[in-house]
Structure formats: C-alpha cells, structure tokens
Amino acid sequence: MSGRRRRELADSFRLVIGDEQWFLRDLLVGVVAAVIWVGATGALAIQVADVVGVSLGIAPGVTPSPVAVAVFGVLWLVVPAVAVAVRLRQRTLNIRDNVEQYYRFDHPAVLLAPPTLLVVAAVAVGIALGGFPWYFSLVLLPVGLFALVRTLAFSYRVYSFSHPLVVHLFVVVSTAVALASALAAVGTATGGGQFAEQVLRSVGLPAWVLGTVSVEGVVVLGLAAAAALPVALALAYVLVQTVVSLGVRLVEPDVDRSAMRTGQRYPPFLDTTTPVGTPAGSPDSSDGSTGTDVDASTVDRGPTAPDGDGTDSEGSVESDDDGEDLDDVSNTRVFTPPAEDGDGGFGSGSTGETRAVPGTDDVGTSSAGGAARCEACGKSFSMNTDVRFCPNCGTALNGE
C-alpha cells in the first residue's frame, strides 16, 4: 500500500471522530424522536379508531387487522425511513448538492474501511458467542446505517457506476426493514413476542424470521439476519460498482465532462491535454504536474494510476476556502495599468504594458525594478517599471 493510500485510510478513520460526529448525534436524536413518534402516533391511532369505530385488533390474543398493520407500517416504518434518507442526503451533501468536501478522497474505497471493520467485529463477536441473539438487531441498526452513509458518499465520489439514487433507495428500504426488526426484537424482549409473530405472519413473512437459522453451528436469529439488510445492500452496490469499473477501464470510453458532478473524479483515461483557461505548463496545485483547466463547475482533475481496488483513481485539484466547493476552479484576472511615458503622463504614444506582481513586503522606492508599499492599503508590491497607481486598490502613488 502506497504512502498516500495509508494517509487516506487513516484520514477515513479520523473522519469518524471529526467531521462525521454528526452521525452519532443524529443517531441519538433519532432514537429519542422515534420513541416519541411511536408513542404519540400509536395513542393517536387508537383514539381515532375508537371514534370512527374501527377495530385495530391490537388487544392481547386478537389477530391484528390489515388496516392496523397498514396504518402502523406507514407511520412507524415508511415515514421514519424516508426521514432518515432525507437526513442522510442533507448530511452527505453541501448546499450545492455536491458531496461534502471531507468525503472527497482520491481513493474512495477507503471510505468503506470503517464500516467494514465494524461489521467484521460484530460478526466475530456473534461467532464467539455461538449465536446472534435478539439484541443484535439493535446493534446492527446503527452499523448498517453507517455502512449506507459511507456507501452513499462513495457513490457520489467514484466515476464508474456512480448512481447515488440507487443508494438512497437502499436507505429507505433497508431502514424500514431494520426498524421492523428492531421493533420486533423489542417486542420479543418485553413479552410481546406472540403479538409480533402474528403481525409478521399477517403480512406474509416466512416463519424463519421469528425463528432461528443454524449456519455452521452458529445460531442466527431471523430478526438479526433481517437487521443486516443495510449491510447486504451496501455490499451489493460496491460489488456491482467494482465489476462495472473494471469493464470501464478495459473499454475506456469517451467522457463527457459536462455530465460529471462536482466532486466526482475523472477516470484515469480522461484526456487532459486540452486547456480551457489555465496556461499549459502551469504547475498543478495537487501534485506539481502541468495543469490543464476544465469546466469550473465540474472540476476534479489530475489523473493518477488506477487504484487496483475496483474503483477509479484520479487526483483532484481543490482549494481551502471555507464554504466553497473545493473542486470548483475560478480564474482571477488582475488589472494592470498602462505604462507611463517619460514626463509622468499617460498615453503619450507609449504602448508598453506595466505589470505589478504581488511580492515581497519590503518597502522600497517606486523606481523600476524596485518595490513599493501603498500608503492607503499597506500592500507591498514589486514592479518592472514605474507605476502611478496601486495595482491592489487603485490609489495614486508618488503624491498623485
């Protein structure tokens, strides 16, 4: 593993306790909000059912009615799942609907390392215990959501098979299933296992969901297996993306730059020899190579070698301005006044160009080849000929 990959891998783990602290905060707030939501909507639904005379069938020993299952399924599963998907989208994207800067690694596969480690640790603990009891549903819920968060950022960053909408759909479906598994697990733990079984069977789910499955001597509870759906969907997306990226590298199709999002890397086969605004031979700010400018609204430049991990490997040119997309590029043109003639006036047949270049802070005279400081703005600059106006603020120099 190269030094650059090791640094990015370490940064991916540090991101969990850095810019990604929002996940733990939102998780705690979400748990509290879910408890309040379930209690409030459950009480409201019972009161409404009593008013309209509809039996929900939620009393002990009574089979729940399809109406009750549908109502509570929408209120307790679908609505929270959509809310989670919307929240994750807000957290992983900036105000311009581009992936957040701290997720823009040159090797996006490193984003998947922390959730992979958590999943491996959970599986190892379950194997050591000889089974996955009901409370593993509650453990796998945040682990699965975290895996989907990183997969969502991964889907925005890579070039090949970059379909974040698919991952958003995975978030909705898997969150609903994981929540159902968590509610059933809580119901089982609090003595409502029979009622939970009746509800699940009323929607046509197989019996093993509330039973157990033995895999190589390890007993897996059906609820815990259902809670692992987010992890399974995230893994499926990454595997498909890996296969597609390998095919893209072999085909090397033409890339339409205008169709790429800001923050999405250019593939290694992208033609970068056509300058748009940056002079050929200018140093690239990320790796010192000769720079070529691209569309300012969709820029991530500087191809590097393939990752070898099933993803595209391209470098990016990014700046450090707060609140701005660091993949965006803008070219600033500095106005330089025309050269003065010999008697201190402008336009006496002189056609030369005066170039004022920001440079040293040393204070000098305004003679040719020297340096000067503007009394108005305090900016020091060097020049190759006499000037009468500060190139920074336009204030007259030399007592003008």
Image: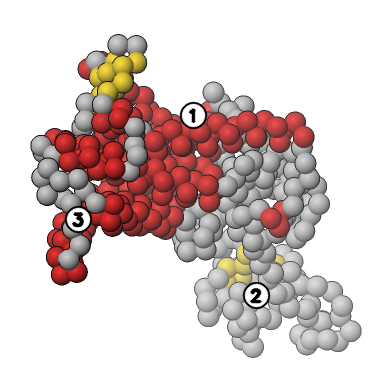
Q: Callout 3: helix, strand or loop? A: loop
Residue 218 horizontal/vertical position (percent)? 29, 15
Residue type, numbered disc 2: Pro
C-alpha span from label 2 to label 3: 78 Å
Residue 329 vertical placement versus 374 (above, below): above
C-alpha span from label 1 to label 3: 57 Å
Q: Quadrant of the N terminus?
A: top right
Q: Residue at x 74, y 52 (%)?
A: 256
Residue 400 vertical placement versus 30 (above, below): below
Q: Which mark is residue 6?
A: 1
Residue type, numbered disc 1: Arg
Q: Is residue 11 visible?
A: no
**First-in-chain label (1 vs 3):** 1
C-alpha span from label 1 to label 2: 45 Å
Mark 1 neighbour class, 10 Å CA radius: few under 14, some 14 to 19, many 20 or more: few
Pointers 1 and 2 in contact (C-beta within 8 Å): no
Q: Callout 2: helix, strand or loop? A: loop
Which residue carries the number 3 mark?
A: 56
Q: Residue at x 36, y 29 (%)?
A: 119
Front residue of 168 and 179: 179
Residue 147 vertical placement versus 336 (above, below): above
Which is more foreground, mark 2 or mark 3?
3
Q: Which mark is residue 259?
A: none
Which residue carries the number 2 mark?
A: 391
